[in-house]
């Protein structure tokens, strides 16, 4: 029998997939955040727990994850996919409106929290340069965990959710100066010299220019080719190629920012932000969702793997005190700061607790600080343990924050109102051919807002050139319909000529919204009967309406009065509807 260690990546992939299959249903059943389940799974199955027992119980090798490096690389992609998805939900205009939160509240939080934690580390005997690095990395929160918790609570689109996201975005932008500080302090430590203020400021300026150049390259390059690239791919009508293009864009932009000294997540966020301005935004978001979910699960497992129960047992009091102290310091800085920026106290307290945990960036910074000689191996491991412990506590802190906010009188008026979605309350028109275009124009003239959906990239492009809101996507997919605002749509109108696609969309819409009116174009009477059976509210057989139009013109040419003509046409329509209902009942 093959030893478990010989299976390598395949064994660990199976363990992760099996864990996801157990954790997600179990957490859903007990109404617990899956984040907690994945963190605990990583703790139990990692090299610091069950992995240590394989020497005595070899069969455990089949159930433990030992390669932290491989897991970390995939986990980093999970965070990148999450930020890419967040970027898709925003736009450059929305981001500009958030500038006060990002560059005001967010940057103030990073600076003040860094100073507070650095002073604490200095008091406990760490050198000033090492203390600054420790303070900087622990000042950052976990983008992946916090945003996932907000998504589970459906609060990403609330005002307080946007504020929290703005702070997290500022923390991602702070990566560049923090990395630079490690390089400068590490070089100075190796040479045994002190670093001047001028060197720090000059180096920071260089690093920031490098970051700005990388961001400018991504934005400029993306605006030039992204829309064209996706249009060419959409022409092929090949879903696999469309998915491959999405993965290429996410991973490619992430690597560009990584080589520029920024985080991968920031590059992915910029790519999502650029695609948010295109007609492909909703379809891309639906296609990327499974990858984001699986890779984020792997990220949470990787965090749990870093927690070493033996180290906790060696310093139980110190670990508990440090975790509690770091959480308290970060919350104490964030709460009054948020209030100073106009956030009501209930939401300020909630945000403070939600952002009080550590972040994934601490693992990278602390390992770099250790390898450069800034911190000892013991200090590095202890701080990693503290950061991991606070991340494990983040879901609990989120629950505490909600309760504190509620007890303090939090409500929609105090900062948790939902930011209106531009697609809410629109009539959904599926198909932008001759019929769909006519319906869209008439409804617009009558002051009804429409969102038009089509899978033909050329029709979508021409519609947008005329100033109409036309998007690319597959309306037969429920997730895509949700992103198009199906929950608030007053009606859905289907105008395509493809019978199979029409039937699939009627089924998807009716399953999601049992009460919404669905008006459908049918090929013939048989097709109309099938559409009624699937839940269509009104069906118009194309051939029948053509014959009525001919009859209308013929009666007019023969001198029949207009009132009589309209009465005859109405009778024929009613007769056809009765016939279709009888055919439906007979099936």
Image (spheres, helix red, strand yellow):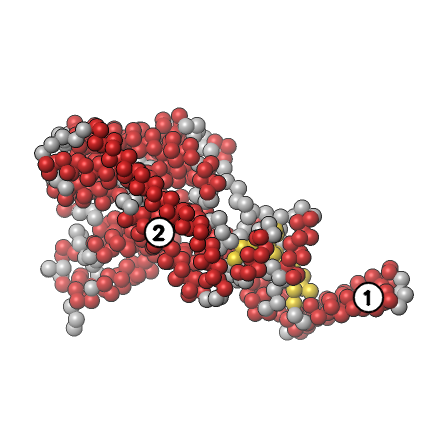
Residue 552 location (% of width, % of height): 81, 65
Residue 50 location (% of width, % of height): 18, 55
Residue found 65% across the figure and 67% down from its top = 522
Q: Residues within 10 Å of mark 2 (few under 14, many from 20)?
A: many
Whether residue 36 is visible: no
| Badge 1 element | helix
User: First in sequence: mark 1 or mark 2?
Assistant: 2
Residue 434 location (% of width, % of height): 65, 61
Residue nearer the viewer, 32 or 142: 142
Q: In the rendered view, tell whether residue 247 sits above or below residue 407.
A: below
Residue 396 location (% of width, % of height): 32, 41
Q: In the rendered view, tell whether residue 530 sits above or below residue 31.
A: below
Cα distance, mark 1 to mark 2?
60 Å
Residue 390 as seen in the image, left or right of residue 50: right
Whether residue 275 is visible: yes
Number of on-image labels: 2
Residue 303 as seen in the image, left or right of residue 482: left
Which residue is tagged 1? 553
Residue found 35% across the figure and 51% down from its top = 253
Residue nearer the viewer, 449 or 209: 209
Residue nearer the viewer, 347 or 23: 347
Q: In the rendered view, tell whether residue 274 sits above or below residue 509.
A: above
Residue found 78% across the figure and 68% down from its top = 550
Residue nearer the viewer, 322 or 194: 194
Residue found 42% across the figure and 35% down from its top = 99
Q: Residues within 10 Å of mark 1 (few under 14, many from 20)?
A: few
Image quadrant of residue 212?
top left
Which residue is tagged 2? 253
Which image quadrant: the N terminus?
bottom left
Image quadrant of residue 56?
bottom left
| Badge 2 element | helix
């Amino acid at each position: 029998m093959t030893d478990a260690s010989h299976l390598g990546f395949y064994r660990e992939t199976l363990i992760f997939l099996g864990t996801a299959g157990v954790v997600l249903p179990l957490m859903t059943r007990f109404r617990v955040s899956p984040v907690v389940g994945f963190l605990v799974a990583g703790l139990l199955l990692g090299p610091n727990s069950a992995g240590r027992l394989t020497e005595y119980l070899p069969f455990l090798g089949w159930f433990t994850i030992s390669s932290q490096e491989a897991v970390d690389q995939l986990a980093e992609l999970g965070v990148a996919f999450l930020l890419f998805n967040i970027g898709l939900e925003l736009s450059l205009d929305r981001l500009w409106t958030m500038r006060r939160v990002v560059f005001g509240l967010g940057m103030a939080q990073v600076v003040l929290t860094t100073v507070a934690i650095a002073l604490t580390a200095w008091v406990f005997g760490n050198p000033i340069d090492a203390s600054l690095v420790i303070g900087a990395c622990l000042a950052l929160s976990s983008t992946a965990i916090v945003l996932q918790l907000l998504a589970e609570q459906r609060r990403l689109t609330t005002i307080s959710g946007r504020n929290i996201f703005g702070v997290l975005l500022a923390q991602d932008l702070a990566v560049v100066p923090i990395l630079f500080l490690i390089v400068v302090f590490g070089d100075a430590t190796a040479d045994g010299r002190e670093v001047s203020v001028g060197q720090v400021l000059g180096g920071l300026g260089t690093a920031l220019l490098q970051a700005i150049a990388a961001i400018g390259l991504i934005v400029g390059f993306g605006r030039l080719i992204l829309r064209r690239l996706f249009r060419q791919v959409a022409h092929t009508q090949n879903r696999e190629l469309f998915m491959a293009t999405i993965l290429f864009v996410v991973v490619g932009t992430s690597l560009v920012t990584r080589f520029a000294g920024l985080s991968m997540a920031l590059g992915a966020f910029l790519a999502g932000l650029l695609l948010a301005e295109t007609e492909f935004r909703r379809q891309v978001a639906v296609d990327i969702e499974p990858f984001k979910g699986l890779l984020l699960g792997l990220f949470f497992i990787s965090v749990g793997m870093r927690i070493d129960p033996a180290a906790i047992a060696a310093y139980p009091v110190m670990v508990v005190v440090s975790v509690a102290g770091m959480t308290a310091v970060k919350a104490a800085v964030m709460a009054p700061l948020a209030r100073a920026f106009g956030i009501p106290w209930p939401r300020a307290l909630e945000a403070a607790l939600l952002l009080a945990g550590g972040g994934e960036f601490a693992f990278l910074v602390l390992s770099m600080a250790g390898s450069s000689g800034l911190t000892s191996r013991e200090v590095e491991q202890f701080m990693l343990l503290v950061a991991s412990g606070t991340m494990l506590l983040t879901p609990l802190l989120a629950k505490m924050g909600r309760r504190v906010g509620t007890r303090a009188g939090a409500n929609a008026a105090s900062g948790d109102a939902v930011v209106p979605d531009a697609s809410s309350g629109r009539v959904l028109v599926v198909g932008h051919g001759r019929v769909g275009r006519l319906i869209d124009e008439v409804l617009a003239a009558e002051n009804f807002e429409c969102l038009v959906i089509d899978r033909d990239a050329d029709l979508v492009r021409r519609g947008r050139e005329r100033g109409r809101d036309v998007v690319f996507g597959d309306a037969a997919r429920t997730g895509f319909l949700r992103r198009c605002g199906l929950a608030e749509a007053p009606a859905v109108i289907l105008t395509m000529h493809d019978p199979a696609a029409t039937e699939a969309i009627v089924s998807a819409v009716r399953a999601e919204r049992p009460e919404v009116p669905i008006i459908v174009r049918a090929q013939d009477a048989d097709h109309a009967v099938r559409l009624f059976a699937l839940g269509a509210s009104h069906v118009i057989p194309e051939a029948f309406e053509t014959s009525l139009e001919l009859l209308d013109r013929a009666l007019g040419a023969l001198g029949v009065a207009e009132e009589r003509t309209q009465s005859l046409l109405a009778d024929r329509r009613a007769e056809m509807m009765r016939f279709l209902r009888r055919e439906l009942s007979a099936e």
